Amino acid sequence: MNKKWILPTLYILFLMLPIYGLLTMSFKTTNEILGGFSFFPQQFTLANYTKIFTDPTWYNGYINSLIYVVINTVISVSVALPAAYAFSRYRFLGDKHLFFWLLTNRMAPPAVFALPFFQLYSAIELFDTHFAVALAHCLFNIPLAVWILEGFMSGIPKELDETAYLDGYSFWRFFLRIFVPTIAAGIGVAAFFCFMYSWVELLLAKTLTSVDAKPIAATMTRTASTSGYELGLLAAAGSLTIIPGAIVIYFVRNYIAKGFALGRV
Amino acid sequence: MSRIEFKDVRHAYPQPAGQPQEYALKEVNQVWENGGAYALLGPSGCGKTTLLNIISGLLTPSEGSILFNHDDVTRLPTAERHIAQVFQFPVVYDTMTVFDNLAFPLRNRHMPEARVKERVTEIAEMLDLSGRLHQRAAGLTADGKQKISLGRGLVREDVNAILFDEPLTVIDPHLKWQLRSKLKELHQQLGVTMIYVTHDQVEALTFADKVVVMHDGTVVQVGTPVELFSRPSHTFVGYFIGSPGMNVLPCSIENGHPVFANNLLSSGYRADTDLSGKLEIGIRPEFVSFSDDGIPVAIEKIEDLGRYQVVTVRHESEQIKMLISEDEPIPAESPMISFDPDNLRIYCDDWAVETGDA
Amino acid sequence: MRKSTNQKAWWLVAPVLLLVAFNAFIPLMTVVNYSLQETFGDNVFFWEGVTWFEQVLRSERFHASLLRQLLFTSMILAIEVPLGIAVALSMPRKGPWVSVCLVLMALPLLIPWNVVGAMWNIFALPDIGLLGYSLNSMGFDYNFTQQPVSAWMTTVVMDVWHWTSLIVLLCYAGLCSIPDAYYQAARIDGATGWAVFRYIQLPKMKRVLTIAILLRFMDSFMIYTEPFVLTGGGPGNTTTFLSIDLVKIALGQFDLGPAAAMSLIYFLVVLLICWVFYTLMMRNEAQ
């Protein structure tokens, strides 16, 4: 009688098909891929993955990406914490404008900034370092973290702060010992989203690096355009980039909506 | 309007696999007479809301049947049962005006618009909402919203009963009293069956002609407030109604009379000597007094409640509460207490032993 | 929440301000500089005033990519919003399947954007991709690298694939916050399924839906990586959206003046949408 499950099932099937296409292709040999379409790999091979894990130009891409993503997440969340606290607890001169201005940076089109960023980071001699990408991604990740954390903090009654101050806690002792543990979930979600947005962004990461800090995404695009049709390798590299997201997603599944809505749900 | 009857109704919520079935409602047989004002009283989790939702058809019981005027309605969908229900938290349709909210159930039943207007105006008048008919319902205070929920039930001319599920929970204390009197007034005016769920005995006792006390998924007693107070048929009723609740003390029976602390107590009625099971006496704090001989106790605590004082005493491991007037002296040395035999009741496995007055 | 006035709170915000301003102001000023001057390299600049702006605003190329952008954005909204609402409505509210649904649906949101493009490129290849092969063997003439219509369809479907889940997840969160009592009251009032949707679910979803639509509007307006990797803006210029065009002008042709002017116009549009978003959100919160 209840046919409600059909639509979500079809939808999920639709979501899984391209991923399935990618995965099967990653297990095929180049000959098989170019030879024509097959639903299952006929000659199952792990060669594409072996190549990625043994060739430094490939696995360095992953390491580079992970390095700048982690640096960015740490910076974004740690500076966003006190700021979000200020926005959620105090009124101060220009607070609303500042909050709005932060949002505009989350929404800024990276294409607008690509060239000036290249010039800026070249000028301060950070070009092609992990730090450059990590700092550049702060442009949208700090606002994101501030907004998400502010959303979580607003849900915590102010009485918690007041009680702690009455008990003689200093601001920083209260903040680090009581407040931060209280919003641990929020911090987790903010970190997750900083991680994700830094991980999925390519335009700035590609513009700011050439060799030493080249992200996996850039390695992939270069492979796609230069070495012709190494589709199996490309598919394997792509499949591997899905893993970090897939691993953590389970832990934040109940907060995904809140995170994407910038803490406003 | 109709008489509602429960026949062997039992209900269990679906459990996660591997867990034993637990009945939220264990066998209820109960008749709700047409036009009665009932209160359904019991602690949280005793099955009150389950019972209410079974009447309105939001739940279909696992076993048993419900009759409206002798017609089986167990499988009848909610909308066809003509039941109105007011929930704990006010439900209003935010985007609609007060008028549209009240008209909603009628429009859903395709009543002609002229008649809708007539009914809504009439009910709004009754609930003192006339002045606010064209305001947005979302802007009203909690009590106003709760009146709208009630009004959506009242506009329908065919309601069999109005059910209230702890409707005053979110209402300010000074408005609670007003709203409750309003309900009482509406009951007298319309004569419709009302069933009022609450865990607050004061609310239950002031609203209802008959109180149905529930405990652990069963109805333990149905009676007028006076009956519940003076003749609790289950230790739970004695304990739950009255403040402080009834003292329940272990006892044995000798020659038909209860014995507690080596004292043969005379009770108003004789009990059979061959009772088996857990035997207890129940005595309300109002009927315990200090006396020259009786049960020796130690005084633990005295609370002054103004005109009364509650004295907590102890005999060995048993704690006994007594309610005495403020000017009554409390003996300083070796105090002893006695129980009023006319108000002493005997319980076997928690149920009152009904042997009739001796 | 009642807030107390405390100017010292500025110290807490200062690090954020510093870092974001470094990334936002300096590049923005660079863009403004370029937009008003002409340069032939070597840091020699000639004042051009608003010439570049006039040129961009008059150019057919800009009109065309703006038009494509608007068409694309409205198409994906027209598909993603109803589809997202429908999926959210039919998702289970409790039980073991909830987590499975949530995790699987969120997966596309977490894939690097260029991989999304690459994945769809592979998926849609006419001779060897799952989608392309299936369509062609079913008798459709499909080749997204050659035919503009195929390219458009693939780009739109890719975006639907990538982002509909965002709308699903947000709407689902909105739906879950509706207390059972509302549905029960509706049953008692004899409301039909449509009335439940119209008077209970939709009003309760309004807030999250506004957020979802604005986010989708803004993000689709800035879309670059996915269509760039999928089609490279082609065939011809048929899938060249604003961002792609901008990068082509700036990095491809090194026409810095027009590119900068275009950037600023683009940025102003985004700013305007952003302001609408902010105002609506703050009004929601005030209620």
Image (cartoon, coloured by chain):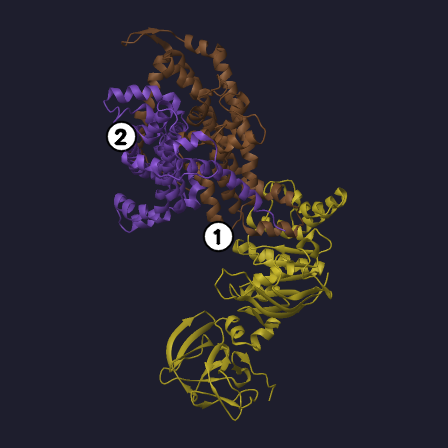
Chain colours: A purple, B yellow, C brown
Front residue of B214/B203: it is B214
Report whether residue A260 is seen.
no
Could you tell me residue A255's position as x and y percent? 42, 44
Mark 2, secondary structure of its residue:
helix
Where is residue B85 drawn, in percent x and y?
63, 55
Question: In the visual, does A25 lie left or right of B8?
Answer: left
Identify the secondary structure beneath mark 1: loop
Q: Is residue A14 left or right of residue B292?
A: right
Callout 1–callout 2 Cβ contact below 8 Å: no
Q: Residue at x 54, y 73 (%)?
A: B237
Say the numbered circle drawn on residue C96: 1
Which residue occupies the extreme left position in the image?
Answer: A125
Q: How many marks?
A: 2
Q: Amino acid at mark 2?
A: His
The relative height of residue C29 versus residue B49 in the rendered view (above or below) is above
Q: Which mark is residue A130?
A: 2
